[in-house]
Amino acid sequence: MHEEAPRSLRRVLPTASLFLKRNPPVGARPGTLAIPKGALRPQIHVMSFDAERIKESDVEDVQEIRKLLSTGAVTWVDVRGLGDEKLLRELGELFAIHPLALADVVNVPQRPKTESYEGQQLFICSTLNLDANGDLKSEQFSVFIGKGYLLTFQEDYEDGLDPVRKRLRDNVGSLRTSGVDYLAYAIIDTVVDGYYPVLEAFADELEVLEERVMRRPRPELLVRVHEVKRTLMLVRRAVWPLRDALSTLIRDPVPALTDSARLYLRDTYDHCIQVSEMAESYRELVSELTNTYMSVISNRTNDVMRLLTVVTTIFIPLTFIVGVYGMNFDNMPELKTKNGYFITLGVMVALGAGMLVYFRVRGWLGDPDDPGEPGDEEK
Amino acid sequence: MHEEAPRSLRRVLPTASLFLKRNPPVGARPGTLAIPKGALRPQIHVMSFDAERIKESDVEDVQEIRKLLSTGAVTWVDVRGLGDEKLLRELGELFAIHPLALADVVNVPQRPKTESYEGQQLFICSTLNLDANGDLKSEQFSVFIGKGYLLTFQEDYEDGLDPVRKRLRDNVGSLRTSGVDYLAYAIIDTVVDGYYPVLEAFADELEVLEERVMRRPRPELLVRVHEVKRTLMLVRRAVWPLRDALSTLIRDPVPALTDSARLYLRDTYDHCIQVSEMAESYRELVSELTNTYMSVISNRTNDVMRLLTVVTTIFIPLTFIVGVYGMNFDNMPELKTKNGYFITLGVMVALGAGMLVYFRVRGWLGDPDDPGEPGDEEK
Amino acid sequence: MHEEAPRSLRRVLPTASLFLKRNPPVGARPGTLAIPKGALRPQIHVMSFDAERIKESDVEDVQEIRKLLSTGAVTWVDVRGLGDEKLLRELGELFAIHPLALADVVNVPQRPKTESYEGQQLFICSTLNLDANGDLKSEQFSVFIGKGYLLTFQEDYEDGLDPVRKRLRDNVGSLRTSGVDYLAYAIIDTVVDGYYPVLEAFADELEVLEERVMRRPRPELLVRVHEVKRTLMLVRRAVWPLRDALSTLIRDPVPALTDSARLYLRDTYDHCIQVSEMAESYRELVSELTNTYMSVISNRTNDVMRLLTVVTTIFIPLTFIVGVYGMNFDNMPELKTKNGYFITLGVMVALGAGMLVYFRVRGWLGDPDDPGEPGDEEK
Amino acid sequence: MHEEAPRSLRRVLPTASLFLKRNPPVGARPGTLAIPKGALRPQIHVMSFDAERIKESDVEDVQEIRKLLSTGAVTWVDVRGLGDEKLLRELGELFAIHPLALADVVNVPQRPKTESYEGQQLFICSTLNLDANGDLKSEQFSVFIGKGYLLTFQEDYEDGLDPVRKRLRDNVGSLRTSGVDYLAYAIIDTVVDGYYPVLEAFADELEVLEERVMRRPRPELLVRVHEVKRTLMLVRRAVWPLRDALSTLIRDPVPALTDSARLYLRDTYDHCIQVSEMAESYRELVSELTNTYMSVISNRTNDVMRLLTVVTTIFIPLTFIVGVYGMNFDNMPELKTKNGYFITLGVMVALGAGMLVYFRVRGWLGDPDDPGEPGDEEK
Amino acid sequence: MHEEAPRSLRRVLPTASLFLKRNPPVGARPGTLAIPKGALRPQIHVMSFDAERIKESDVEDVQEIRKLLSTGAVTWVDVRGLGDEKLLRELGELFAIHPLALADVVNVPQRPKTESYEGQQLFICSTLNLDANGDLKSEQFSVFIGKGYLLTFQEDYEDGLDPVRKRLRDNVGSLRTSGVDYLAYAIIDTVVDGYYPVLEAFADELEVLEERVMRRPRPELLVRVHEVKRTLMLVRRAVWPLRDALSTLIRDPVPALTDSARLYLRDTYDHCIQVSEMAESYRELVSELTNTYMSVISNRTNDVMRLLTVVTTIFIPLTFIVGVYGMNFDNMPELKTKNGYFITLGVMVALGAGMLVYFRVRGWLGDPDDPGEPGDEEK
């Protein structure tokens, strides 16, 4: 989601990574918060602003937020890390979050979706990112759009929202004057924009794979092709439900959004469709790669067979002939003739040459890598 | 549906298991109860509770239930085993169940569905379970949601609803205070949660299969791949109509459900979609496995062919040459020369070496398992 | 449609059987009745009943029916055989059947469908049956639901409706008291139930085919696989439009049906969906069979190649060596040495053994049917 | 469209034939009439009739039509050939045809469709025909349904509407008394009926192809399979949009049609669905043919390989043995023994026989065309 | 888009070309104009006309346009080149364009779409073109339909709209009298017509590829097949959303369009559907090409194998026989007989001939390119 050169897709996730764990134990009561092991301690960053002023602070205590909420026209409470149930419950209480909504935020991963609660709109999507190792990382990103406040939850400390923060601080454009819903749009748009570098990495990867499959088809490449296919499944899982969620935001009478914000979200929706269409194109290309692999292998087998057949077909009859005159019968008149040996050699040369000519006429000879005779290209 | 480590998928069902028998004989009058052979004798467990009190009892006589119904605000009548037509008919009478609804409950298996009857909502779904042998077991689970009572029917004695019962007994959360529909949600949610360990077992199985297909493709693996595909069909048959049934419960004006319960069922619906998407992903992975199998076999055939061709192409011409000098012609001048033998040997070594060099240049030599020259990986 | 053990699927229909002839000559005026050649002479069986009485009679003259119509509350006129245009037209007149409706009944086969005419509902579906030879037989079954009468048309004398007739005669259940629409339901339900034994025969056939393809893949099996696929197309052609027709009966405001009959037809609709889902599963299994066939063949080719390569690669170099010492050069010092022969033998044994060891290490030896080393299965 | 025996499908169209030219030059103003080269000079045939009288005439001058229009209750103006722009424009003026509608009629081919213009309904469909050479011919057929007149346009002089004309002349059925819309139905129905013989030709062709692919798979057959597939694409292009057009006529409030005509068109719509379902079935069968081709080839390769392997594996070791005793070492004790030769022969016979037995046990011997041992079929 | 002979498809774009860059940097504020590098300096051409007069001028300064707007009834402002942000913003101000709409115009490529803004309708589509090198070029074409003016934006100087300009200048048809929306139709129709030559080039290419795959299947052809597939993806990306956009224009109550223009756009919509159906046909044909490739290769491998097997199977046993009589045993009675040699030769000839006959009977001999015996074609 940064503006650096897109990282390449180095390693991809195994089959198991496609599995979505049901986080709270089966049969747990609804609203149970199942803090994942290794979840980070929440860091809360609050930006409160109106057209003239902006105030930023890192808060430790949920009660501090209460005061900040009345500071500016709009307050953006950004929670990074989900590792403290008590703090999360306090936040839930402060913002009057429905227990199921809070559970959806904490019990990652959920399908991207949007749901209306009284006085709030919850929007859940996934970020897609290539980390420094080229691994695809997908994290849940949740936004509550309320009256005068925006509450975002992220799994990790690092995010791609710094451009939005900078625009807020620098007071660029209408971000400081346009209300909570426009800020929500700016944030969601930035998340969706983060999908582009990931897909670009796929395009690069596919081009390399295609070239290798044509040049040197090995089972190792198939493993790689499957990994790419599986990673594309992950991308699809993030993007397709997001389309639906955005379309709901745009079409349904969601009270938290003004018509103007809806117009802007239509733009984000267009990007989301572009991304999903690209992902589908890549899926098709990957499917084709397996076919290509098979075709190339078949072709190579055919080339190998042809060489084997030419060599065998020429030499086996000749070897038979020399075998005949290697027999030890007492009465073999040819053996006594003066030029029998030379005649035999001559016959064999003629036979071999004849077969060579036959094979050349049939087109079985010539370098198998040669795309064809020149005349072939005339048409 | 227990919280233990998920069992692995050991044996799967044959083609015939995909066949759904029409249980009552063809042409039987509607409402006929076709008790399956080997159906268990029903055990009836009744839990009657309100916020303060909870009363549990195992009843033998249907008439006892009548008394219990007025004990608490909510009464959950749980019938396990479908092997007693008389008892089932008595229950049908007691709760005023429509004959077709009762037949749907007894004549298993039905497609998951929900239907409205006067004063009652019937919800039918399937449990998915791995038994101790790793066999996939699918049983029908039926719920009648009525006024002040919940009536559940299960085929087997063992179920995965103990967590719900424990929450009732311990009075955890709002289960005791939230009415029949919330209890119905809690039960259906627990059934759906039981799908997760099954799918996890599929993920494990697929990973093992993938690794084996790459390493040692044998027809036995294909049999296994087909079994997995068939078992996934069973899963799909349970999950897809369940999505529709849940969506009907959420969207349609079902009188038995309050808006609050609908909100919770939306959560179950989300899980159901997650499960069905996972099942679809696994289907795709399984389809790919067959392709991979073919590709790996093709590759191996190509490797074998290459070795055969190299060996044959080198030695057949040499064998011809030694055959020539094994002929018994009287007049073969080369045989008389002093160094003819050594010159011939030299020529043959040169020929063989030349062909080896040619094959190496063509890339046909080198260990076929070698992924390629180091320079190959630079790109 | 009988309750006997389901017959097996012995012979299936050729491609041409998928073709639906347009029965009346092209350009014929609408309503033309094209009595198929070999159509049976119609037999008319009338059952007239109310709760107390039931009267059955075989009638020859259409005018007799008129009298019978007023005998009971409900009259079921069952016409078997379509081979008498005059009689059919008289029936059309008696029951005021629209010419197009009558043509749909007579010009078999039509797509299953339901259509509303004034005072009548026409419902057309197909029976599926395995005859004594295991051939799939599909015949058209048409029902007119009118006021106080039910008019059914069948192509053949034998049908599967005897259970319904027996229930009428024995006055079992509410069939005698529930009106025309309930009788229509009972009849349609019996036709749909008749699909189950046919699908069961498919399941059996598929299991046999699968086992054979794995064990002994021969082109003859492919022919069989195609036949099964084609027969499944016939099943699909019967079942899919029937789903739509039933759904129309259930959802649309069809005046001929009461709400109660609609409730029962919902049950038939469920069976119809079950049948169509099973048919789809079988189609998938059949598609997979072709893939399996290819995989098994590929595997066998690979096994054969491996043996060929091992034998050739071991003996061709050895044959070359013995060829060398079979040459007749005068000056071949090795031939004079005392132990040359034995040394040569030793070298050849060592070479052969070395190559055997190499092939074993590469895993090319061992019985090709052996699924792998024991250690292989540990994982 | 004639009632003769259906012609067989002799030659099919190349890829280019799938291309629909945009007839008027790119950028031409809308309504431009692009008379195709070689278009026939229009012949105008007018039938004017009511219940009592019918008057037929071939007219040369458009103005004659004006008089005929008032002759009968219904006037059918049939224009065959589109090769005279002036005449077509005059017709357009006479019947007040919208310029775009006229362009749709002339600039063939258009997608089948129906469009409402003021006082007129335009219906465009395609005829499908096998000409005397077995070529598939598809021509555009356009009908304007107006008040008291029907205006049809065809590309060619020959058509399949003679049965309709005959019914008009003979005053059979209600064609003369039922209005313009019923006549339109009769004509469209005749066009759709003309699809049946074409599909029958496909069924025949597929059966021949299937049999040949199994018996003698050659690349020439693949070419033919592709041609059939391509021709089916042409059929689909004619039939699918026609379904939509008919469904529009039936469902939408088209003023030109009475309810009674709609009832009859529902029948045509049913035929259209039948045809499109058959075409889809054939597409599936064609797709399968390619798979079968591959399977049969694989199987043959396997059979050939097996023979090669058996022969090679038996004789190569034997040839090695005889090579050993063909060596010329001075000291080879076996050569001196009295029975060495016979013992060697015996050993070789035993070796060969042993391998034969081994191969037979493995099932590699026996006629490769033999479907299996008798016991194999018992199951 | 010109009327010349369609150029052939010479080079197609690599995988990366399927990637749509997100033009403004991620996180940029909405409405940012990201002028692409190398964008051309805008040229503005204004045509202002009514039925009597037409005035054309190339303007440099945006303010000049303001004056021209009132000259005629309709003013068409055509901007070619997007390389001047200041000028574009001035245009945006002059025509009161929404910042997001302006960004959609400049930040190419967008998905084809139409959006309503106050007083304006934005329509975005893509042109498809083969340049002089046979490369597929796709450029964005944007139209604002306002009150009395039409504002078009193109990426490049060259366009295919000259026929429209000519029709305006020559006052052909009703273009000068029919308002802004009819002009918009004329322009969009011309863009869509420009797709036809491109698809024709595809048809030509496919025919060449098909012929080559059958005659000389080489991996190079596969590369080409993939390129074609990928280029078709580009076409689909242009055409499918355009269908939706046109359908929106036709169906939705877009105030900028009169009913008459809608009628004409329905014609363009029909063309668009034709184009998309052709593109789908070509996709199917391309998919089939890969299958054909595989089949042809398999067939060739089979032919090669057959020759190898015939030669080997005939000569290996013969070589064994001559090897036997080449052995040097002292006691080999046959060697002493007078006619042993000739008998052996005779036996070998008989053996070889016998096997030849066997292979011919099995149909393995004869030219493998021969489609079969003459009798084969009789059926």
Image: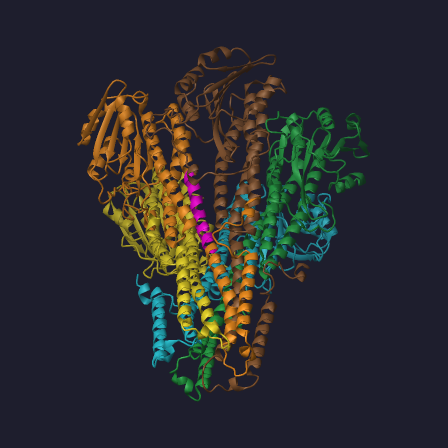
Chain colours: A green, B brown, C orange, D yellow, E cyan
Q: Nearer the viewer, residue E239 or C274?
A: C274
> Total marks drawn?
0
Q: Is residue B172 in view?
A: yes
Q: Is residue C289 magenta?
A: yes
Q: Which residues are magenta?
A: C278-298
Q: Which residue is found at the position 35% from the left and 30% from the top?
A: C189
The quadrant of the image that shows the N terminus of chain E is bottom right
* In the image, residue B358 above or below residue A301: below
Classify residue C239 by image quadrant.
top left
Q: Looking at the magenta stretch, what is its main secondary structure?
A: helix
Q: Residue C76 placed where, x, y %?
A: 26, 27
Q: Residue D234 placed where, x, y %?
A: 42, 54
* In the image, residue D138 above or below residue D50: below
The quadrant of the image that shows the C terminus of chain E is bottom left
Side of D58 relative to D114 (left or right): left
Side of D45 relative to D238 (left or right): left
Residue most extreme to the left: C60
Q: Residue D107 placed where, x, y %?
A: 45, 56
* In the image, residue A254 above or below residue A356: above
Q: Nearer the viewer, residue C8 or A322?
A: A322
Residue most extreme to the bottom: A338
Q: Nearer the viewer, residue E350 or D322?
A: D322
* In the image, residue B68 above or below residue A268: above
Q: Residue C138 placed where, x, y %?
A: 31, 41
Q: Is residue A303 magenta?
A: no
Q: Is residue A361 in view?
A: no
Q: Nearer the viewer, residue D218 or C31?
A: D218
Side of C214 relative to C166 (left or right): right
